[in-house]
Image (tube, grey):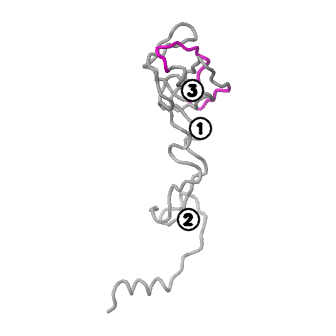
Amino acid sequence: MIPVEEALQRILEKISALPEELVSLDQARGRVLARPVTARVSHPPKAVSAMDGYAVRAADVAGAPVELEVAGHIAAGETFSAELGPGHAVRIFTGAQLPRGADAIVIQEDTEEAGEARVLVRNPVPKGYYVRPEGLDFQAGDIGVSPASASV
């Protein structure tokens, strides 16, 4: 009788890996990966809001309470073409891409309408507040699944 390690070594010396084959996901069950699966894009692809509220420049609300002019609104899946200027805010919803120039989110609970197209921001927020930065979950090129960790 031979030790298990030696028996395994003898078996592995006699076999070789099958060639790589591209199959659809529904045909992948019971197979193993030939190489790592990497992300083609970053997620989120751009900085997005983590909460409903207002996209602002943190510097503009540092002295809150402060009133800002509301320059528009952005729903999830939409973009805002203009750059956010000083003294302005943009109404934004969870998952929406931050407008250029914005670097923080003031959640709606910390605001109140202050007349037509104006919002009162009650409290200051730091840069990056309630912002999910580009690539937070994963970045293009990151390995999502490697052959050693895959089980299908």
Q: Is residue 150 magenta?
A: no
Query: Can you identify the residue that label 2 sits on?
Result: 35
Query: Can you identify the residue that label 3 sits on?
Result: 75
Q: Is 22 above or below relative to 19?
A: above
Percent across and percent down for residue 50 are 48, 32
Percent across and percent down for residue 120 are 49, 13
Q: Which mark is residue 5?
A: none
Query: Where, by quadrant of the figure, is residue 74 drawn?
Result: top right
Q: Which residues are magenta?
A: 62-81
Left/right of residue 80 with respect to residue 107 in the rendered view? right
Q: Residue at x 67, y 27 (%)?
A: 81
Q: Residue at x 59, y 41 (%)?
A: 45
| Secondary structure category for the residue under label 2 | loop
Percent across and percent down for residue 107 are 46, 23
Query: Can you identify the residue that label 1 sits on?
Result: 46
**Residue reaching furthest top?**
115
